[in-house]
Image (tube, helix red, strand yellow):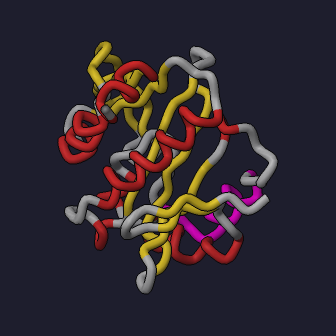
Amino acid sequence: MSLALNTDRLILRLPRMEDAERIAFHLNNFGVAGNLARVPYPYFMADAKAWLRTRHADLPPQETNFTIEVPGEGVAGSIGFHMGSAGEPVIGYWLGQPFWGRGYMTEAARAALDWYFDVTAEDRVLSGVFDFNTASLNVQTKLGFTEIGRSTMHCLARNAEVRHIDTELTREAWIGQKR
């Protein structure tokens, strides 16, 4: 299956093994990895290849990831869905540091969430940020996510429990903000 989402400035497509070098390059940056729960630091080519081996075109939407590609600049990051510990869908994302501050993540997330709510019957998507990650919280706020609590979450890159702001986006809020 060839799944691609196009925005004004980005291409979101299924990850390929050829993306390993760019993924490893961007995630082997503590400024990126230190904001993510499930990414180790340092991050090596072997880590990227191991993750890419888990990505298949036939995965359900709740386990689908997209590579974020900036035409002319290559792979800039990733956005995707996974089932959280409570059995509910979670959206997660990262962007390589050279691409920060350009509005790419908000643009990519809008496309991914449109796709997700179109192809599933899910009533909500969970997410969240480590409490120091104001840029990511701003992205979620723009998208209509609301805070539903506070917790701690283990961060592999920091090898520590980190304060976390838990968020959700309901289908109703998503549809409402698009009107």
- Image quarter of the N terminus: bottom right
Check the image and report above or below for 163 versus 108: above
- Residue placed most toward the observer, 34 or 134: 134
- Residue placed most toward the observer, 107 or 44: 107
- Residue placed most toward the observer, 149 or 68: 68
Describe residue 171's horizontal placement relative to residue 31 as left or right: right
Check the image and report above or below for 140 versus 6: above
Residue found at the very far front of the displayed protein: 179
Check the image and report above or below for 71 versus 36: below
- Estimate the x, y position of residue 160 in percent, counting from the top left: 38, 35
What is the quadrant of residue 131 in the picture?
top left
Check the image and report above or below for 35 versus 68: above
In magenta segment, residue 177: no
- Residue placed most toward the observer, 52 or 103: 103
**Residue lying at 76% horizontally and 43% vertically, measured from the top left:** 59
- Estimate the x, y position of residue 32 in percent, counting from the top left: 35, 57
- Image quarter of the C terminus: top left
**Residue lying at 33% horizontally and 35% vertically, measured from the top left:** 178
**Residue lying at 43% horizontally and 67% vertically, measured from the top left:** 10
Describe residue 43's horizontal placement relative to residue 97 as left or right: right
- Estimate the x, y position of residue 58 in percent, counting from the top left: 81, 48
Q: How many numbered marks have been drawn onto this rendered protein structure?
A: 0
- Estimate the x, y position of residue 97 in percent, counting from the top left: 30, 66
* Majority secondary structure in the magenta region: helix
In magenta segment, residue 52: yes
Q: Which residues are magenta?
A: 43-54
**Residue lying at 64% horizontally and 36% vertically, measured from the top left:** 119
